Amino acid sequence: MLNNLQKRVITALLVYPTIIFIILYSNEVIIRLFLNIIIFIISFEISKMCFYQKLEVISNRKHYYFIASIFALIFISNILIKNNIWQILIVPAFIMWLIIPIYLTKLKKIDNIDNFNIFYFLTFLLLISSFYCSLYTLFLYSSKALIYLITIVSIGDIAAYFVGRKYGKNPFFNNISPNKTLEGFMGSLFFCLLASSIFCLFENYDFIFTLKVLIITFFVISISAFGDLSVSLIKRYSGKKDTGNILPGHGGILDRVDSLISAAPIFLIFSYFLSAIIK
């Protein structure tokens, strides 16, 4: 019988190469289809935690409205991307992800929420739709940039897990996620900046571009931790342990991409406005 860590490793070794292959060898239609599938699953997972109320049809209207609204926003996202005005959706999400760490820092008490109100409904819509918009926009700008983002966030997750497990002593938002530690967070920053430096040397980037990539990486990994914490908070609010069980050792798809949801819009905005899109 495989333990949880072994399941996590095997799942990661299967999922990561598959995603990279799809990015490298697919066209826009396949990428949109793949992203739509991912968005549908994570939307369903988050809606099932927050808006689905057993089998009563009337009380589940918010659940169905949420799923429908997500795909309406994906349709709008494609129009925005086509007209190169994706900033209309991404900038509000960028601002939201800068506010969320402040909210989490000030959060003292966490109680179960029986009825997630319109604020949560709209916030989830913005963050999930901006996730799609960010990934698809990045793909159109540069598939290498998208692969870099996914890779560096994955390195951050792995480093935080193992460094925290080995050396973690000081809790990092203990009220939200008791297993996360400050040492794990610092370890993820260190290894991601190290990996980013090696990547820039390998690509022979000049000093200014390398410095931009390192700055972007620092902010992306910092904010990605709060994407992870945000999903943990939603699970605490809803009284759930995992968002699903589709990925052995990880839980749901949302458990796997939580860091990426916050990292993607931050990475896109910084890369675009610093003229540092990895090609």
Image (tube, rainbow, N blue to C red):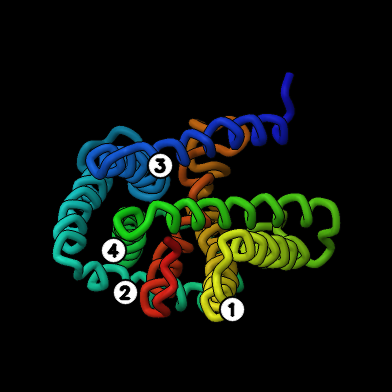
Q: Residues within 10 Å of mark 4 (few under 14, many from 20)?
A: few
Depth order, front residue of 89/46:
89
| In this view, the mark in front (2 or 4) | 2
| In this view, the mark in front (3 or 1) | 1
Amino acid on which disc 4 is placed: Leu
Q: Is residue 245 left or right of residue 157?
A: left
Please give the label number shown on residue 38: none
Give the residue drawn at x 47%, y 46%: 254
Q: Is residue 89 visible?
A: yes
Residue 243 spot, x, y in % from top left? 49, 42
Q: Quadrant of residue 118?
A: bottom left
Name the residue tied to disc 1: 207
Q: Quadrant of residue 96?
A: bottom left
| In this view, the mark in front (1 or 4) | 1
Give the residue drawn at x 70%, y 58%: 180
Q: Residues within 10 Å of mark 2 (few under 14, many from 20)?
A: some
Q: Residues within 10 Å of mark 1 (few under 14, many from 20)?
A: few
Which quadrant of the figure contains the N terminus? top right
Above or below, 148 against 11 in this view is below
> Upstream in the sequence, badge 2 or badge 4?
2
Helix, strand or loop at label 1? It is: helix
Name the residue tied to disc 2: 92
Circle 1/circle 2 CB separation < 8 Å: no
Circle 3/circle 4 CB separation < 8 Å: no
Amino acid on which disc 2 is placed: Pro
Name the residue tied to disc 3: 24
Give the residue drawn at x 44%, y 58%: 145
Please give the label number shown on residue 122: 4
